[in-house]
Amino acid sequence: MNPRTIQIHDCEFSTYIFEEEIIARITMLAEQLDKDYAEKRPLFLAVLNGSFMFVADLLKRVSMPCEISFIRLASYQDMHSTGKVKEILGLNEDIEGRHVVVLEDIVDTGHTVHGLLQQLRERNPASVEVATLLMKPDCLQHPLDVKYVAREIPNDFVVGYGLDYNGLGRNLRDIYKIVP
């Protein structure tokens, strides 16, 4: 497959991770989740908007009984994390005693996940884990134990497969990184 270049707003991006690799890595995550949560009937908590493609493809491959709920948090503006988590649409389910798996598109600074985990733990779940499509370990500013990571990437700004740049690019099948 040949990389291609696209323009989004004022930036140029080139193909970074092709859809076939994304799906292969998601399939491996689904198999691990099926194994780890076989008897637990987890509640998958999808963080919108960016995780929608990841969540759809992951849950099509999970075979155990489970529930899914959606919340919306914001900590991004343009290409930079604001460092503040703002809950927009909240969690309506009672998670006390439940096994919760947070589904994220990307973990970079960790501000969003750190803030969300604090809020969730106040509700006394049996367990809380995080599954993410992408992780930027060099960017972490919080000590996070992200158990399920489809792929680690360096500190490049990426779009596609649910990830956006000022609203555009979420619908792309591949993941693109910014061209410096």
Image (spheres, rainbow, N blue to C red):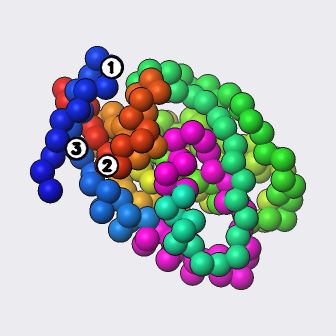
Is residue 100 shown left or right of residue 32? right
Is residue 32 rendered magenta in the image? yes
Q: Is residue 111 in view from this perspective? A: yes
Amino acid type, residue under disc 2 in the picture: Asp
Position of 12 relative to 111 (above/below):
above
Q: Nearer the viewer, residue 69 or 74?
A: 69
Q: Which residue is mark 1?
A: 9
Q: Are marks 2 and 3 in contact (CB under 8 Å)?
A: yes
Q: Position of residue 109 (x, y in %)?
A: 48, 36
Position of 127 relative to 179 (above/below):
below
Q: Locate the C terminus by quadrant.
A: top left
Which quarter of the figure has residue 55?
bottom right
Q: What is the crowding at mark 1: few (fewer than 14 residues within 10 Å), some, or many (at least 20)?
A: few
Q: Which residue is mark 3?
A: 15
Q: How many marks?
A: 3
Which quarter of the figure has residue 170?
top left
Q: Name the residue at 66% across, 38% down.
A: 72
**Earlier sequence position, callout 3 versus callout 1:** 1
Q: Position of residue 136 (x, y in %)?
A: 39, 44
Q: Which residue is mark 2?
A: 174
Q: Which residues are magenta?
A: 27-55
Q: Is residue 148 in view from this perspective? A: no
Amino acid type, residue under disc 1 in the picture: His
Distance from the alpha carbon under mark 2 to that under mark 3: 7 Å
Q: Name the residue at 24% across, 46% down.
A: 16
